[in-house]
């Protein structure tokens, strides 16, 4: 930006360099809505103070200007000094750092301005390929994303591998296998046999299938075995499913897989949960009540990218993996923490089905029947959040259903007629 000489009485100033001496710069209504003075302020690290009710900020659809500027209504102009005095030194430093970053990222050269303009136009046309909030507004945002290149568009390879963690419920396991084999996009079934004492059933007992089935015998009975990136998994998509989830139809699973193909960096699945802040304990609480708000999709019946299996196995922070295996609980919560912390995105629940109860299990067989189960999972959430030093889970009020799911149309016009009601 070129400099000019400005005078005030006998004093001569080099503008805009002189702005570096000031913490705040007023931006008021001008013929060009103050954008020249705004850019001068950004270039010199002077925090813009916007006093205009109608100003349209540059690139405001993608830039969160509240991170780098102070906005004051015109009616409050007489309180400007008091308001600026109330801004802490730490807050002012953050505003200054962000304003300098925005200048260097988007406005320093004509090439950068042109590039940003074309990127915005591209997002308007191809919304599914758009960047998220962090990409546009957080310096070094890539540091919070997976270090590998995880796609955010549908993968080229079609099909998924069903990974079933099982211990000794053979009849339920066989029933599940016979159901999911009917899912069109299934390419392989991988059985993770977690019982280190008892052998899996003999080959002749297993269902006769039209698609490959492989058995992996675990060396230890650990819940984390379900997330190991086994070489036998040759697809990007993994359906993680418990051996007692026999209530899902092939249409429900196929639809969930297609939703995942649109959002391959997310966890996409069926049973959902949420977390809330408990004022009585001054901590987080695990909630299983059926509400409009979710922040977790349980991996007892969910799709995820194989990349997350690598990440869970090799890069889980702190002692979370050991905690999960010692408590035999919360591996699904741990995976939700991992994905949310890496992507900054919420999971996606599909279809309205609520209950996921094992039809042949006794109360002693079901973890969810244990009165201590909810308390343990609350402990998990608080323990994990302390390790992450934040609460990474993202809440959302969203569920994916087929377009014609509730519409009164002939069944032949609908693709997923096997999706059940409540």
Image (cartoon, rainbow, N blue to C red):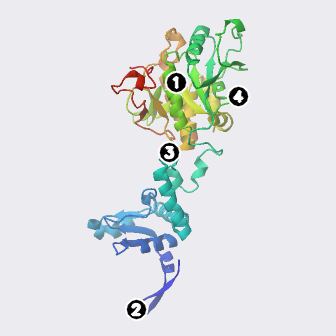
Q: Regarding mark 2 in the picture, which secondary structure is present there?
A: loop
Q: Position of residue 262 (x, y in %)?
A: 52, 37
Q: Which of the 4 quarters of the picture holds residue 38? A: bottom left
- Marks 4 and 2, Cα distance to the nearest angstrom? 77 Å
Q: Which mark is residue 230?
A: 4
- Marks 1 and 2, Cα distance to the nearest angstrom? 77 Å
Q: Which mark is residue 141?
A: none
- Closer-to-camera residue (418/1): 418
Quick check: 420 left or right of 310? Answer: left
Q: From the viewer's perspective, is the residue at label 4 or at label 3 nearer? A: 3
- Closer-to-camera residue (213/144): 213
Q: Regarding mark 3 in the picture, which secondary structure is present there?
A: helix
Q: Regarding mark 4 in the picture, which secondary structure is present there?
A: loop
Dot 4, how many residues are within 10 Å of its Cα: few (below 14), some (14-19), or many (20+)? some
Determine the residue positioned at 45% across, 52% down.
Answer: 124
Q: From the viewer's perspective, is the residue at label 4 or at label 2 nearer? A: 4
Q: Regarding mark 1 in the picture, which secondary structure is present there?
A: helix
306 relative to 352, above or below:
below
- Looking at the image, can residue 319 be seen? no
Task: Check if mark 3's residue and mark 2's residue have beta carbons within 8 Å.
Answer: no
Which residue, given by chain and number where applicable, does mark 3 sit on? 128
Tell me the quarter of the image containing the C terminus.
top left
- Marks 3 and 1, Cα distance to the nearest angstrom? 23 Å
Dot 1, how many residues are within 10 Å of its Cα: few (below 14), some (14-19), or many (20+)? many
Which residue, given by chain and number where applicable, does mark 2 sit on? 9
Q: Position of residue 189 (x, y in %)?
A: 64, 21
- Marks 4 and 3, Cα distance to the nearest angstrom? 30 Å
Q: Position of residue 166 (x, y in %)?
A: 62, 16
Sequence-first disc among 4 and 3: 3
Which residue, given by chain and number where applicable, does mark 1 sit on? 253
Sequence-first disc among 1 and 2: 2
Q: From the viewer's perspective, is the residue at label 1 or at label 2 nearer? A: 1
């Amino acid at each position: 930006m070129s400099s000019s000489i400005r005078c005030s009485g006998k004093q001569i100033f080099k503008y805009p360099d002189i702005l570096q001496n000031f913490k705040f710069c007023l931006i008021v209504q001008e013929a060009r809505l103050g954008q020249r003075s705004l850019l001068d302020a950004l270039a010199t690290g002077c925090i813009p103070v916007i006093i205009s009710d109608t100003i349209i900020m540059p690139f405001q659809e993608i830039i969160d200007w509240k991170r780098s500027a102070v906005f004051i209504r015109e009616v409050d102009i007489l309180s400007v000094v008091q308001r600026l005095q109330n801004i802490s030194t730490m807050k002012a430093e953050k505003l200054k750092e962000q304003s300098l970053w925005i200048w260097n990222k988007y406005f320093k050269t004509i090439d950068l301005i042109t590039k940003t303009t074309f990127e915005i136009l591209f997002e308007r046309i191809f919304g599914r390929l758009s960047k998220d909030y962090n990409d546009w507004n957080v310096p070094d945002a890539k540091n919070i994303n997976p270090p590998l290149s995880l796609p955010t568009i549908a993968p080229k390879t079609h099909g998924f591998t069903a990974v079933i963690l099982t211990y000794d419920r053979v009849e339920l396991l066989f029933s599940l296998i016979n159901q999911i084999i009917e899912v069109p996009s299934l390419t392989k079934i991988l059985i993770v046999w977690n019982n280190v004492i008892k052998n899996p059933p003999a080959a002749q007992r297993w269902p006769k299938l039209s698609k490959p089935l492989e058995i992996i015998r675990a060396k230890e009975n650990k819940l984390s075995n379900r997330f190991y990136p086994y070489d036998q998994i040759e697809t990007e998509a993994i359906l993680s499913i418990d051996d007692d989830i026999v209530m899902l139809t092939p249409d429900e699973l196929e639809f969930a897989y297609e939703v995942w193909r649109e959002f391959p960096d997310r966890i996409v699945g069926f049973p959902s949960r949420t977390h809330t802040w408990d004022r009585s304990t001054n901590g987080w609480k695990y909630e299983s009540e059926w509400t409009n708000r979710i922040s977790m999709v349980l991996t007892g019946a969910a799709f995820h990218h194989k990349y997350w299996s690598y990440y869970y196995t090799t890069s889980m922070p702190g002692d979370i993996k050991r905690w999960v295996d010692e408590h035999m609980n919360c591996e699904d919560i741990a995976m939700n923490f991992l994905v949310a912390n890496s992507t900054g995105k919420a999971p996606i629940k599909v279809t309205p089905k609520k209950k996921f109860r094992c039809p042949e299990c006794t109360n002693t067989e079901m973890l969810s029947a244990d009165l201590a189960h909810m308390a343990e999972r609350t402990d998990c959430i608080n323990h994990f959040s302390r390790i992450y030093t934040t609460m990474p889970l993202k809440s959302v009020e969203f569920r994916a259903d087929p377009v014609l799911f509730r519409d009164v149309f002939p069944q032949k016009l609908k693709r997923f007629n096997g999706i059940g009601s409540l």
